[in-house]
Image: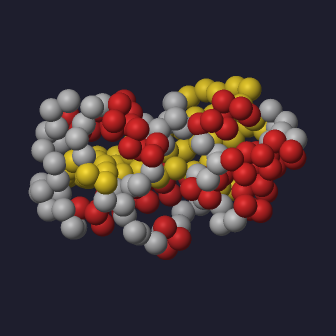
Amino acid sequence: MRIVLASESPFRQRALDMLGLAYEVRPSRINEKAIRDNDPARLTRRLAEAKALLVASEHRDAVVVSGDAVAAKNGRIYEKPGSAEEAAEFLRELSASEFQFVTALAVFHSRIRKMLSAVETSNISFRPLIEREIQEYIRKYPVLSYAGAFESDAVLFFADRISGGYNFVTALPVSPLIVFLREQGVDI
């Protein structure tokens, strides 16, 4: 069974690499801003499913894997920042607080038109961050590629407490990914 990953994310590629699967990378070029929802779980699920469907339309006999992730705090959704200044703003707002990291997974079998999707949430508490470390992090990492302006290294650097799923490591919930791939006929 041909597997297509609808993402260029090295973290999502790592999830499939961990499973030892051969796959093709065909990023979705969906306009993410055209899909909106005030609920982070619904938003990420809708985006992940839309990405899978778009890529599947170009790959008729494949299992397409896609995902989406956001950070959320007090009703605000933090997607990918548009600039280094916005990334710094995000990190300042997440500093010394608890927030959710929400990740959706969609696995779509294009031949039989079967969609499976799931959402996982991690609760993350960042310790108070100082401006110097925020600026150093922004200089060192491609923060414009990360929901909330951070990735798993930042969680290691900044978090003092984590509960829930470990979806922030690969930006795809790996355990449901295994189950969904099996349900879609992938031998794993």
Indicate the position of residue 23 as horizontal and vertical percent values.
Answer: 25, 46
Q: Is residue 148 visible?
A: no
Q: Is residue 84 left or right of residue 123?
A: right
Q: Is residue 3 visible?
A: yes
Q: 92 or 120, which is in the foreground?
A: 92
Indicate the position of residue 155 as horizontal and vertical percent values.
Answer: 66, 34
Q: Quadrant of residue 26?
A: bottom left
Q: 3 or 35, which is in the foreground?
A: 3
> What colour scheme has been applied to the protein in the rendered image?
secondary structure
Q: Quadrant of residue 49?
A: bottom left
Q: Residue furthest front?
A: 140
Q: Residue at 39% across / 33% down in the picture?
A: 174
Indicate the position of residue 181 as horizontal and vertical percent values.
Answer: 23, 38
Q: Is residue 79 above or below residue 121?
A: below
The tally of labels here is 0
Q: Is residue 168 left or right of residue 135?
A: left
Q: Residue at 56% across / 28% down in the picture?
A: 164
Q: Residue at 67% across / 38% down in the picture?
A: 154
- Quadrant, the C terminus: top left
Indicate the position of residue 156 as horizontal and vertical percent values.
Answer: 66, 30
- Quadrant, the N terminus: top left
